[in-house]
Amino acid sequence: MLIVGINAYHGDASAAAIVDGRLVAAAEEERFTRIKHAAGFPTEALRYVVKAAGATPREIDMLAVARDPWARIMRKAWHAFKMPLVARDRLSAQSHFASIGTEAARALGAGESSIPVGRVEHHRAHLASSFLVSPFDEAALFSIDGLGDFASAMWGVGRGDKISPMGVVTFPHSLGMFYTALTQYLGFLKYGDEYKVMGLASYGEPEVLEEFRKIVIAPNGGRMDFMLAPEYFTYQKSGAEMTWSAGEPTIGRLYSNFLATRLGAARDPAETVDKRHIAIAASMQRRLEEVILDRLRSLQRATGLKKLCLAGGVAYNCVVNGKILEQTGFEDIYIQSAAGDAGLAIGAAFDQWHSSAPRQREFVMEHANWGPEFHADEIAAILSSRESEIASQGCVISQIENEDQLCRLTAATIAEGLVVGWFQGRMEWGPRALGNRSILADPRRVEMRDILNSKIKRREMFRPFAPSILEEAAGDYFTQSYASPFMLMAYSVRPEKRAAIPATTHVDGTGRLQTVNERQNPLYYKLIREFGRQTGVPVLLNTSFNENEPVVCRPEEALDCFLRTKMDLLVVGQFTVRRSCENQLSSARQ
């Protein structure tokens, strides 16, 4: 049985395919269109996952869609009556989703036939995306994001293959929209910029926390609900201007003039970030932590369960995640690699698989490698076709005989202080590069942060870089050792180890680590282990293989990024492209 799940006409459009209850492929549309957070219909992602499943359109038993037009229908109708923007969005959504089975068939070249459609409420799909692929037989569940099917949070319990919701927070109250509104206020206007503010927050103290406690009203002591004070936001009166139909999604201004009178003038994107902006970011982050951690404590007490599955866009806040096991009573946690809206594709598919008949769960998502892969002959042909261009930039192509030699060469290059583009195997599912589409560097060199930010990534200088560490060594370098395979937890670096890995230690002494074991990614594990053998430090600095664009998907994109940013070495499959010594830009040549 083949079920294809999609997230469509929403940010981070995506598709996933499961065959007989096992995931076989998943990818975001942005990786194919090269448009960050691409919205609209996931045409290319859909084509990829069906091809990866070895199927034809007629063999798809169901198209599972993470959208239920009947969920909270009366509340939707009331707000649509009051708010013109909401009414417009409702009508637009209805027109798109009414014929989505036909649209999917057309995208797959099946003419005007239609694929059977199963609809799953947004937050139920989020809960399913985590619990139904987790290793837990029983767990408390929590989904929290901006908005979907007129809700921003849902919580409940998962047992076996069943999900039982316990409660929901509905529009207009949303921690995700709160964070987005303040991200806009701080001058970061692109869809998905919230992670920048999370990094910025670590540079300051929450000096205006009391004001933020007025913005987010969330009584403690067993309550799961929360409210946003309406005077601080515009969308509570008129709705929010959002574009989801195609291309890069946008969200209109969410914060009100009243908020600016309380916190000071909003930052212009061209304005330098100052101490006031940092204090606001720190206060916002702290208030988010207070509210989420208290709700999770309440959820743990209410359910009596020690395992937690977390999902939704707010589940990308690794600072909050890193505090959950220490501060809430939960002892185990699972967050899948595409916890945000892209993950809805997996959630909808698995929900429909388990809803169609009682079934034992047989699949656990232990790794994120569900995207396209490219074989040696394809890579060789691409490099050969561009050999003259590569040579003109002072680069030399080589082929490496075996994995051991490849890892020795790559580890030695990184240990020299050079920067490596690492392209291997299947592309990762979710926003993090986890060792298959990564830029790698030496975490021991404090100057590496500035080199990468200014000369490779070309991004804000305050943004941190992540450490990839052998799973068995995590406790030696961090105060917590709970596995973090998807780079979704920030732990404190042990004080005595901060000088050993300064390039991956953030200003607050934490690191957003990825733990790597041999079962999840054998080649990347071997590379980190080899770097540890050569240097004594089993850690690599890992950042996504891109430069202000979606993470690279194809070898051509990896080569383009390598040549454009002037990294020192590209390792793509068993081939290397090395820049000549006089053209190297990394720390060993500074």
Image: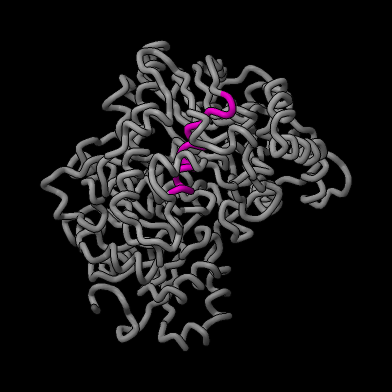
Q: Is residue 416 above or below residue 247?
A: below
Residue placed at 63% from the left, 59% from the top? 33
Q: Is residue 310 magenta?
A: no
Q: Is residue 181 magenta?
A: yes
x and y percent of residue 487 in the render?
37, 44
Q: Is residue 169 above or below residue 271?
A: above
- Describe residue 487's horizontal placement relative to residue 89 as left or right: left
Q: Quadrant of the N terminus?
A: top right
Residue placed at 30% from the left, 83% from the top? 581
- Describe residue 567's horizontal placement relative to residue 93 as left or right: left
Residue placed at 31% from the left, 34% from the top? 209
Viewer-side residue, 86 vs 248: 86
- Describe residue 68's horizontal placement relative to residue 456 as left or right: right
Q: Which residues are magenta?
A: 170-185
Q: Quadrant of residue 524?
A: bottom left
Q: Quadrant of residue 408?
A: bottom left
x and y percent of residue 462 in the render?
32, 57
Residue placed at 16% from the left, 55% from the top? 500
Give the dominant element type of the magenta stretch: helix, strand or loop: helix
x and y percent of residue 109 in the render?
81, 52
Q: Quadrant of the C terminus?
A: bottom left
Q: Is residue 160 above or below residue 266?
A: above
x and y percent of residue 2 in the render?
69, 36
Query: Is residue 265 visible in the rendered structure shown here?
Result: yes
